[in-house]
Amino acid sequence: MLSRRRRLDVLPIELAGRIPQEIFDIIIRTVPDFHTARSCSLVCKAWSSTCRLRFFSQATLDRDYIDFLAKAGENILPCIRSLNVESEYKILLNLREDHCKKMLSLVPRMSRLTSLELVGCHDAEIARQFSAKLGANVELTTLKLGMLSIVSLEECLKCVGFFGPGLRRLELGFVAGAGMSLGDEVCLMDPVLLKLATVNINPCSVPMLHWLASSRTSIRSCKLYWWATRVEDLSALEAFTNVENLTLHFRSFDPSYRSLDQALAPFPKLKTLFIELSREDPVKDYVAASLGDAGHGVPWYIAFLSGAVSTLSRLTLQIFFRSEQELDRMEWGLLNDLLRQLPAYAALEELCFQVRWPYPPEEADRWIRSRVDVPRSNFKLKVERCW
């Protein structure tokens, strides 16, 4: 009995030789199975080189991996594009340690390195040494600094400045001292981030935004965490008029800001907006905005969202509640009116609620969908769980 399975003929060798290597590179990079990709690395040297770029493009350094790279580094080090250096193994606590010296000796051979993440450093010295080892041949585009015990904002900004004007993405997370006041000497620092496109800062401060203003025309995406500040400080964002994606996490602030409904006016190109609505005291949510009847207060987030002047495609609201009764504290009627009536939300494609609560996510999905009026047939409503 003949098999009904379709026969797959092998491509003739004279045709296979005409296929550019770039085609094979694309196929190998998209192979989902690791074991299949590992088998591809055994076919020939050209395929092996492509597979190494896939296997070793991201590296997290610890003592064992440093020893491995020191032995097999000539073929692997040029493949590393993203490097994560953590201090959990105490290799960064003392620059005189053998492993730290060995690690720094490997850096100059990472010729394709574009992203560097330093976590848990205790001063800016390690950043200075990394930048010195990278030299002029390697230009980082992404820099992530996390949990650095830097004594002042000035030192933090100098740490960023070590890596020069090539940076496109900057992430600062829990950098001690980054929220300190900015001195005159820092205000006069030469701008080095003229091409920065994405910033992610936690916690954020007004002085840091003033320094980042040197990139005000190039920044397209801002993700900022505000801790213990005033809404008036949002005026520091007004210089970033080309922002297309804005994420704001508010922690503790006084929402009694008379121009809150104008806070989004400086962003005519805004496409996606994320704001956190979590508040410890819902009673303080109401402000006397300049909307409608000035004698009636509206929630601060309604006043804030009403100020959008661009046509948004995606809006994400992060909320926290412990019961369905707490969920009713939100002004759903005002939110639905805002989505239906304001031009900024006329073309909204997706409204996403990120929910922080201890109950099953399907209950949150059901409760929220029963309160949101879907304005159009092509409108997508999502409910996600976050932590």
Image: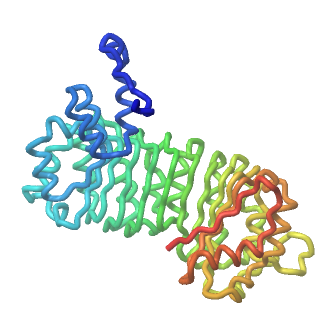
- Where is residue 41, by image quadrant? top left
- Where is residue 53, by image quadrant? top left
**Is there any visible trace of residue 135 in the rendered image?**
no
Q: Measuring 25% from the left and 25% from the top, which residue is drawn there?
A: 46
Q: Measuring 77% from the left and 70% from the top, which residue is drawn there?
A: 372
Q: Nearer the viewer, residue 38 or 177?
A: 38
Q: Position of residue 199 (x, y in %)?
A: 50, 53
Q: Position of residue 286 (x, y in %)?
A: 76, 81
Report the side of 249 relative to 30 (left or right): right
Q: Position of residue 17 (x, y in %)?
A: 31, 14
- Where is residue 381, by image quadrant? bottom right
**Is there any visible trace of residue 316 in the rendered image?**
yes
Q: Measuring 79% from the left and 75% from the top, which residue is drawn there?
A: 332
Residue most extreme to the front: 1
Report the side of 376 relative to 67 (left or right): right
Q: Measuring 68% from the left and 86% from the top, which residue is drawn there?
A: 324
Q: Position of residue 333 (x, y in %)?
A: 83, 75
